Image (cartoon, grey):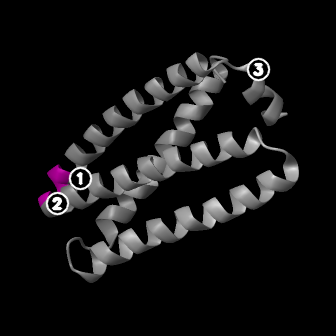
């Protein structure tokens, strides 16, 4: 079970995973931004912002899950549910603000957010095959 895995891993093992995830995500963000810039230079900034929001969002989610897994079940369910909605509403408000105030067009940050999620899923699959998790 995930809770038992979290309890048996040391903080150093999780830091090692996080460092690899940050490295691979940084490389993917740079590559994706260059590709988007070569297609449409105006969209590159939005892609980079969306990617950054996605990575921050996933880091926030992993902290919520890690803390929740270490709590007793009754308290954990309430903790995770409340924090999940706070995270979701904060992300939505940031996107809405960027689009409403015409700082970014709606599509480029969505592309960046999507790319960060799929990159992170790929990283998790790759690292789990190396038995890092």
Front residue of 25 and 92: 92
Front residue of 47 and 98: 98
- Which residue lies under the disc numbered 1? 36
Disc number placed over residue 40 in the picture, else none: 2
Under circle 1, the secondary element is helix
Under circle 2, the secondary element is loop
State whether the magenta stretch is mostly helix, strand or loop. Answer: helix
- In the rendered view of the protein, which quadrant contains the N terminus? top right
Specify the segment rendered in magenta: 37-41
> CA gap, disc 1 to disc 2?
6 Å
Position of 94 with respect to 60 (left or right) is left
Above or below, 108 relative to 44: below
Front residue of 74 and 2: 74
Disc number placed over residue 8 in the picture, else none: 3
Are discs 1 and 2 less than 8 Å apart at CB? yes
Mark 1 crowd level (few <14, some 14–19, many ≥20, 10 Å Cα): many
Of badges 2 and 3, nearer the viewer stands 3
Above or below, 30 relative to 19: below
Q: Position of residue 121 (x, y in %)?
A: 56, 41
Q: Quadrant of residue 103?
A: bottom left
Above or below, 97 relative to 108: below
Q: Position of residue 37 (x, y in %)?
A: 17, 52
Whichever of callouts 3 and 1 sits on the residue coming sooner in the sequence is 3
> CA gap, disc 2 to disc 3?
47 Å
Position of 26 with respect to 87 (left or right) is left
Residue 74 falls inside the magenta stretch: no
In the displayed image of the protein, which residue is found farthest to the left? 41
């Amino acid at each position: 079970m995930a809770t038992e895995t979290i309890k048996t891993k040391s903080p150093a093992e999780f830091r090692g995973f996080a460092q690899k995830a940050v490295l691979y995500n940084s490389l993917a963000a740079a590559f994706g931004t260059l590709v988007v810039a070569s297609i449409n230079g105006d969209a590159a900034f939005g892609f980079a912002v969306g990617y950054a929001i996605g990575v921050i969002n996933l880091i926030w989610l992993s902290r919520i899950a890690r803390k929740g897994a270490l709590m007793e079940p009754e308290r954990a369910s309430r903790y995770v549910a409340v924090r999940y909605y706070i995270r979701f509403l904060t992300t939505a408000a940031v996107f809405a603000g960027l689009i409403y105030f015409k700082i970014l067009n709606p599509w480029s940050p969505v592309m960046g957010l999507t790319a960060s999620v799929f990159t992170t899923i790929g990283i998790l699959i790759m690292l789990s095959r190396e038995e890092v998790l």
